[in-house]
Image: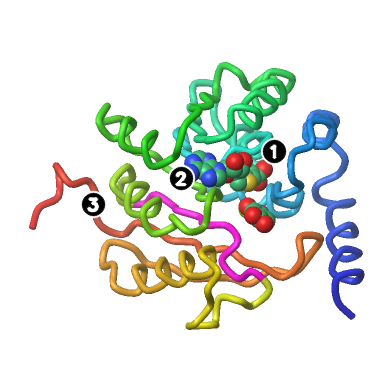
Amino acid sequence: MSQTRWTEVDRYFEGLLAPPDPILDAALAANRAAGLPAHDVSPGQGKLLHLLARGIGARRVLEIGTLGGYSTIWLARALPADGHLVTLEVDPGHAAVAAGNLARAGLAGVVEVRVGRAAESLAELAAGRPEPFDLVFIDADKANNPEYFACALALCRTGSLIVVDNVVRDGAVTDPDSPDASVRGVRRLAEMLSGEDRIEATAVQTVGSKGWDGFVIALVTADPRPSTRIR
Ligand code: SAH
Ligand code: DHB
Ligand code: MG
C-alpha cells in the first residue's frame, strides 16, 4: 500500500484535472532525452503551483532551480501576457534544455532563465532593486534553503507567497542528527520560519508519483523589503 497506489491515485486525478498536454509532455520528453534527472514536480504539483500563482493574480514570479523548466511552464502559464518570471539555474546544460522547452511553449518572452549559482544571481537581482515578486518557488540545492528563503523574502511584498519543495524527503526531516546536507538545510529553514515574524507558514506532506515529500507554503504578512521597512 505505498508507491504503486500513490502513483495510481496521482494518475487518476491527473487524468481528470491535469490531462496530457503536448507542450508539458514534450518538455518531459526533452528532459529525458537530454539525460536530466527526473526531479520535476509531478503534474498535480505543477497544477498546484499554477493555481496558487493564478489565485493571487501573480504578475511576477521568481523560481530558484529550473532544471528543464517543467515547473516553470506551469507557473508561467498562470501569468498575464505582460507578466514576468525569472528562473535561476546553475547548470548551463539544464538551462539550455529549459530554454528550448520554454520556447516551444511560447513562453520565451515571459520567462528569463538566469544561469549561475542562485546565491550570486539573487544578489545581482536584489542589487537591481526590482519590483517585488508575487510568488517565489524554491526548488534548488536544499542545503541552501535558509539563504534562498532570506533572499526571496527580501524580494517580496506583503501578500506574496513563498513555496519550498522537497521539505519531507521520505520523513528524513525529523532526524535532528541527520548528516544529510539537504535534511539539515530543510531543518534550518523550518527553525528560521518559526522565528520569522514577517511570514506565516505551514508544511504539508504529500504522497504521489514523486514518493513521500512535501511543501512549505509561506505567506508574507509584513513588509519584508529592507529599505521600506518601518521599525
Ligand atoms: N523546479 C524544477 C526542478 C528543479 S531540480 C521542476 O520542478 O521542474 C533542482 C535544480 O536546481 C537542478 O536543475 C539543479 O541544477 C539546480 N541547482 C542546484 N544547485 C543550484 C544552485 N546553487 N544554484 C542554482 N541552481 C541550482
Ligand atoms: C530531488 C530534487 C528535487 O527538487 C525533487 O523535486 C526531487 C528530488 C533530488 O535532488 O533528489
Ligand atoms: Mg523539487
Q: Is residue 169 left or right of residue 123?
A: right
Judged from the image, the secondary structure of the residue bearing numbered disc 1 is helix
- Report how far apart the C-alphas of labels 3 and 2 lie in the structure: 14 Å
The quadrant of the picture occupied by the N terminus is: bottom right
Q: Position of residue 24 (x, y in %)?
A: 78, 34
| Residue extent of the magenta highlight | 159-169
* Residue 154 visible within the image: yes
> Which residue position holds label 3?
223
Judged from the image, the secondary structure of the residue bearing numbered disc 2 is strand
Name the foreground residue: 188 vs 28.
188
* Residue 54 visible within the image: no
User: Depth-wise, is mark 1 or mark 2 nearer the camera?
Assistant: 1
| Badge 1: residue crowd in 10 Å (few <14, some 14–19, many ≥20) | many
Chain-order first, disc 1 or disc 2: 1
Name the foreground residue: 72 vs 220.
72
> Which residue position holds label 1?
70
- Report how far apart the C-alphas of labels 1 and 3 lie in the structure: 31 Å
Quarter holding ligand 1: top right
Amino acid type at circle 3 is: Asp
| Residue depicted at 68% across the width and 34% down the height | 68
> Which residue position holds label 2?
135
| Residue depicted at 65% across the width and 28% down the height | 93
Q: Is residue 171 left or right of residue 202?
A: right
Chain-order first, disc 3 or disc 2: 2
Q: Position of residue 99 (x, y in %)?
A: 64, 22
The quadrant of the picture occupied by the C terminus is: bottom left
| Residue depicted at 70% across the width and 50% down the height | 41
